[in-house]
């Protein structure tokens, strides 16, 4: 999901960078306000942990292998703002040390993977936990579902950015990104849940309550991320989703760079606007698939949570949940 | 790098640390200058119109000249470019699926390759810690710089720790089953997290002992 340099235009890059900066600002404020000095090294090391954990290979079919993304894992283990900072650090290091993800696209990458992914992930985690209770099983259910949703939402926002930049048309970017990431998200959900379950087995107190922040400040934090994510969806996704047939053309017209598309379409006449069959229906069928995927993901999360909690361990999980305030 | 053998320390270092020490003109330039020039190059190649092929070629030639000036082995630069390129190609492939996609694909590929090469030249001749100093001078919030510095400092430690955990796991289990394997790898990741949080406690104590304050 790392966008390289050259795939975003100035407008998209600047808008995403602005929203990324706002998100990092919220996270910095939250961590500073909690005056949790002891958590600063933990955040830095958690970033290194995500990087190291991404190097662990999980074999998938046919010699390919996947790896953890880690946003929801860190959000569940350390809380949303710590996750925002840790994932930002991971992306900055990947960008400057490994040329993974572009410099001009750094804002967009940080927004997608360090703000949308942990923000959406943590919000869903908190919602499901509120609904399902405080047992280990409900935690794992919440983790798995949150991991799936956050990966898919981040991918959709990424597709929206590519489309808004005019690099890849929405009717291609959305089905491709959402489709691939609905599958990747299954892996992410399974791995994240397995890791959280293993941490809970070995050190239940690490999973305990979220350190530092009070309920009210966490509420403010989550509201801020929620606003940013919704803003991202409105800017990057809504223009295309509202009128899928020609969303891009409308935006192009509105922003006055229609002529660019016209100029280029002369060069490649064989594919005029809607001659590639399947892509139009691909958008709507991707939306349908997304709905089905959401249901399946919830079922998967439920099955995983059941499988990973030993019989009679739910009570144990609850005990650990309330026990120690420190992690 | 799907085909790489699992653990090989020197290889790890080669992969993890892009910096190659040298005494060239480029190495001696202040990090701030290198960062700004690299950023400017990236910006220019991003903003170039899609069909500006001669300009791409010119920039490529210029960057190659700089690469020769740095005296960093071209093999190293090429290797790192090769490692980073698949990600760019992956996204560019999406562009192929649409109308007049071939042209967009080629332009994207040229732009992203130029930018990748810029950044690789930067990180091959500049230590990440020097870049962090520049970030600090650019008024990046201190908390973020500290997070980055800690991450960079413990990156190598934790990657080695991961390698040790994996070696320990491999010497004790004999299964290659997929489902079971996932569980075991997840346990390794969980153990790594536990060790990480314990190490963070010790690091915090050490930082406090040296008078650190948020």
Image (cartoon, coloured by chain):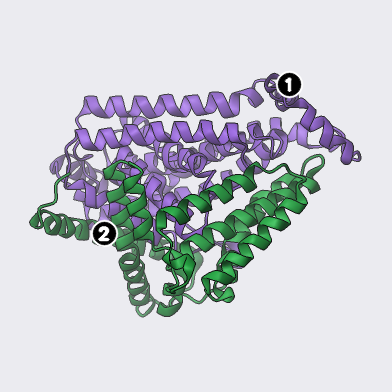
Chain colours: A purple, B green
Residue designated by label 1: A253
Tell which of A159 and A292 is nearer to you: A159
At 79% across and 37% down in the image, what residue appears? A278
Is B54 in front, or is B148? Answer: B54
| Residue ID at (62%, 66%) | B65
Instruction: State which chain disc 1 sits on.
Output: A
* Lateral position of residue A68 relative to residue B53, left or right: left
Q: Is residue A6 visible in the rendered structure shown here?
A: no
Q: Position of residue B146 (x, y in %)?
A: 27, 50
Residue A220 visible: yes
Secondary structure found at label 1: helix
For residue A54, which numbered disc appears in the image?
none
Q: What chain letter is assigned to the residue under label 2?
A: B
Q: How far apart are marks 1 and 2 (CA)?
A: 52 Å
In depth, the one of B14 and B54 nearer the eye is B54
Residue B84 on image: x %, y %: 57, 61
Left or right of B115? Residue B17 is left
Q: How many labels does the image show?
A: 2
Query: Where in the figure is residue A132, as x and y percent of width and height?
Result: 33, 32
Q: Provide the residue designation for mark 2.
A: B196
Expressed as whole percent of the image width and height from the top left, the position of residue A160 reads 61, 33
């Amino acid at each position: 999901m790392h966008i390289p340099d050259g795939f975003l235009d100035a407008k998209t890059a600047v808008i995403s960078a602005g929203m990324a900066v706002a998100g990092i600002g919220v996270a910095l404020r939250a961590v500073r306000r909690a005056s949790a000095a002891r958590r600063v090294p933990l955040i830095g090391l958690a970033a290194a942990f995500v990087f190291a954990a991404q190097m662990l290979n999980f074999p998938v079919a046919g010699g390919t292998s996947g790896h953890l993304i880690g946003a929801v894992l860190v959000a569940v283990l350390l809380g949303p703002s710590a996750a925002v900072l840790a994932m930002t650090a991971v992306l900055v290091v990947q960008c400057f040390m490994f040329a993974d993800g572009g410099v001009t696209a750094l804002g967009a990458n940080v927004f997608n993977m360090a703000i949308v992914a942990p923000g959406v992930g943590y919000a869903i985690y908190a919602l499901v936990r509120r609904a399902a209770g405080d047992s280990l099983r409900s935690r794992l259910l919440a983790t798995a579902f949150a991991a799936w949703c956050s990966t898919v939402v981040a991918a959709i926002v990424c597709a929206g950015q590519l489309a808004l930049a005019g690099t890849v048309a929405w009717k291609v970017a959305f089905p491709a990104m959402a489709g691939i990431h609905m599958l990747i998200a299954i892996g992410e959900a399974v791995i994240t849940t397995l890791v959280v379950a293993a941490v809970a087995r070995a050190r239940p107190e690490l999973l305990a309550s979220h350190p530092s922040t009070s309920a009210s400040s966490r509420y403010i934090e989550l509201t801020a991320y929620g606003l940013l994510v919704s803003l991202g969806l409105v800017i990057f996704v809504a223009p295309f989703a509202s009128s899928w047939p020609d969303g891009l053309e409308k935006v192009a017209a509105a922003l006055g760079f229609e002529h660019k598309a016209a100029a280029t379409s002369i060069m490649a006449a064989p594919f005029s606007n809607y001659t590639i069959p399947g892509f139009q229906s691909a958008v709507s069928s991707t939306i349908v698939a997304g709905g089905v995927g959401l249901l399946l993901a919830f079922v998967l999360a439920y099955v995983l949570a059941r499988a990973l909690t030993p019989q009679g361990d739910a009570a144990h999980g609850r005990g650990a949940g309330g026990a120690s305030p420190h992690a | 790098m799907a085909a790489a053998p699992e653990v090989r320390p020197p290889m790890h270092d080669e992969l993890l640390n892009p910096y190659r020490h040298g005494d060239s003109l480029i190495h001696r330039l202040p990090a701030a200058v290198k960062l700004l020039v690299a950023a400017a190059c990236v910006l220019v190649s991003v903003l170039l119109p899609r069909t500006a092929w001669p300009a791409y070629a010119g920039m490529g030639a210029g960057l190659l000249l700089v690469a020769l000036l740095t005296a960093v082995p071209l093999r190293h630069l090429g290797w790192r470019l090769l490692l980073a390129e698949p990600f760019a190609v992956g996204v560019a492939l999406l562009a192929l699926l649409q109308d007049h996609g071939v042209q967009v694909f080629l332009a994207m590929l040229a732009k992203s390759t130029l930018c990748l090469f810029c950044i690789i030249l930067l990180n091959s001749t500049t230590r990440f810690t020097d870049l962090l100093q520049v970030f600090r001078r650019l008024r990046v919030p201190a908390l973020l710089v500290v997070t980055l510095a800690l991450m960079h400092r413990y990156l190598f430690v934790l990657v080695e720790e991961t390698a040790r955990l994996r070696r320990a796991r491999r010497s004790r289990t004999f299964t290659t089953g997929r489902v079971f394997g996932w569980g075991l790898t997840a346990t390794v990741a969980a153990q790594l997290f536990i060790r990480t949080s314990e190490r963070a406690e010790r690091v915090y104590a050490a930082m406090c002992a040296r008078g650190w304050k948020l």
